[in-house]
Image (cartoon, rainbow, N blue to C red):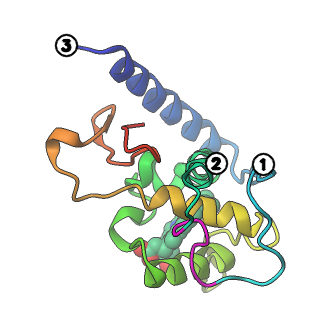
Amino acid sequence: MVTKSRLLKIFMAASAIIFSGSVLAHGNVSPQAVDVSTLPVIGEEWVEENPYRNEDDSTLLEEAVKIGKSAFNQNCARCHGLGGVSGGIAPDLRETLTPDAEGDEWFMYRIRNGAERNGITYMPKFEGIMAQEAMWALKSWLDTCDPEVDDDSSCWVGDEKNSCLTAEGQCE
Ligand code: HEC
């Protein structure tokens, strides 16, 4: 049976493909602002571990996941694919980014510095463009994308398996 939410996901995947097509056609795309006004301010110092992960306040984590998902779709999905499932251009972020201090460190290094080799920018740097709060919100959402999720509970976007969950453990 084709459910309403599945149709919606197919539609979203289709519009993302159209969107990424127009992105390629227009070359560089400026990063989209991420509204973090509903998250507590972290401050100037860079923290080493996701401050929202061990948050006792689950509504705060939910908010971070929500903001992170939207920030990802606006700033990262065109290269990294919907749900962090690689679209072929950039690595599959679900494989390398573990939801722990080690994964946090690698994530922060890459998002702050981008990736540039021999004068070629493979990934733009986001430091100075995106607030630290937005970066950790992104990581909070990515932490919900577990490639090991079994088939029964996995979520789909179009034909892509997308196992990212909402903070409540629901498929997106
Ligand atoms: C213009 C395309 C592009 C955009 C936009 C982009 N990335 Fe990347 N990203 C890449 C590429 C390409 C690599 C691989 C870099 C390399 O070859 O070292 C990468 C690598 C990474 C890595 C390291 C992954 C690994 O397996 O080592 C992380 C983490 C990452 N990106 C996160 C993000 C996040 C979060 C965003 C959005 C804020 C983002 N990227 C936006 C292209 C992009």
Q: Are marks 3 and 2 in contact (CB under 8 Å)?
A: no
At x 30% / y 39%, what residue is drawn? 155
Crowd class of label 1 (few under 14; some 14 to 19; many from 20; radius 10 Å): some
Q: Is residue 101 above or below residue 66?
A: below
The magenta stretch spans residue 23: no
Report the residue marked by disc 3.
1
- The Cα–Cα distance between marks 1 and 3, rounded to whole angstroms, is 37 Å
- The Cα–Cα distance between marks 1 and 2, rounded to whole angstroms, is 8 Å
Report the residue marked by disc 2.
67
Q: Left or right: 79 with respect to 152?
A: right
Crowd class of label 2 (few under 14; some 14 to 19; many from 20; radius 10 Å): many
Q: Amino acid at mark 3?
A: Met
- Of 75 and 50, which appears nearest the observer? 50
Secondary structure beneath label 1: loop
What is the span of residues highlighted in magenta in the rendered image?
Answer: 48-54
Q: Quadrant of residue 73?
A: top right
Q: Which mark is residue 92?
A: none
Q: Amino acid at mark 1?
A: Asp
**x, y percentage for residue 23?**
63, 43
- Of 100 and 55, which appears nearest the observer? 55
Q: Amino acid at mark 2?
A: Ile
Q: Left or right: 91 with respect to 159?
A: right
Q: Are marks 1 and 2 in contact (CB under 8 Å)?
A: yes
Considering the whole magenta stretch, tell me its main secondary structure: loop
